[in-house]
Image: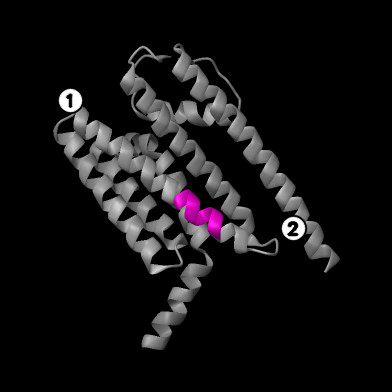
Amino acid sequence: MKLKTIINWNKVMQYKYLIALIGAFNFLLTPVHTVLSNLSPSYMVVTNYTLVILSSSLLASKKTEKLTTYIIGLLTLMVIWLEFTDTNSKPILILRLVFSFVLFACFSVILIKQLVKIKKVNLQFILGPLLGFLYLGIIGGILFEAINFLDSNSFHLIKGFSGFSFYYFSFISITTVGYGDITPLTAPAQSLTLVMNIIGQFYLATVIGVFVGKYINTKSN
């Protein structure tokens, strides 16, 4: 029974990038889940945040890395619960932004360390950079929300905006689409937008270059 459990767990770990990718996508679709399920936003946020933490923690190959992500993830969830009980508390909001940033930064570092070890083009190498792109957008959303917290006049926001609008704007920035519905108004907000623009394009160029290089090496061998 124990051997069978180990074998099944090894099969799960073979698809850890796919599981983490689904978890991250699911997190970004939280507003859609809220509308379709007719459940409270707080319930969906906590549920999807839990799923993205559990799925992304599969990337960690060392016990210390797993323990670190679980601890930070648990602290983040606790702060999110507290924020729903007191939506006007600035200290709780600051803690949520700090813990969220550290959490996804840890996921990104773990992912990069894993991708460096991959020598051939395979499913993991294809899904890994896509997952990294999602982490980049989520981190950008956290930073944009932090900028707006420091100065509420940092952005021209659409009517009925929510905290999710900053994640939306982050992905718009790193893909340089620029719909114009959300506009950075202050110098810090504009500077962060420029940085996200540059990082997004540099990320795509780097991933494509590395992918082509590994593909050529695989074919030549």
Residue 38 visible in the shown view: no
Closer to us: 141 or 16:
141
Q: Are marks 2 and 1 in contact (CB under 8 Å)?
A: no
Residue 21 coordinates in the image, percent (x, y): 50, 51
Q: Tell me what residue is drawn at x 48 percent, y 56 percent.
A: 110
Residue 52 coordinates in the image, percent (x, y): 39, 51
Q: Tell me what residue is drawn at x 37 percent, y 39 percent.
A: 30
* Separation of residues labelled 2 and 1 (CA atoms): 50 Å
Q: Please identify the quarter of the rendering in which residue 46 is found.
A: top left
In the rendered structure, the answer to whether residue 134 lies left or right of residue 78 reads: right
Secondary structure under tag 1 reads loop
Q: Give the residues drawn in magenta, as a range.
A: 107-113
Secondary structure under tag 2 reads helix
In the rendered structure, the answer to whether residue 75 lies left or right of residue 169 reads: left
Residue labelled with disc 2? 214
* Kind of residue at badge 2: Lys
Residue 213 visible in the shown view: yes
| Relative vertical location of residue 116 with respect to residue 106 in this rendering, above or below | below
On the rendered image, what quadrant is the N terminus found in?
bottom left
Residue labelled with disc 1? 88
Residue 214 coordinates in the image, percent (x, y): 74, 58
Quick check: is 76 in the magenta stretch?
no
Q: Tell me what residue is drawn at x 17 percent, y 28 percent.
A: 89
| Relative vertical location of residue 105 with respect to residue 66 in this rendering, above or below | above
Q: Tell me what residue is drawn at x 38 percent, y 68 percent.
A: 63
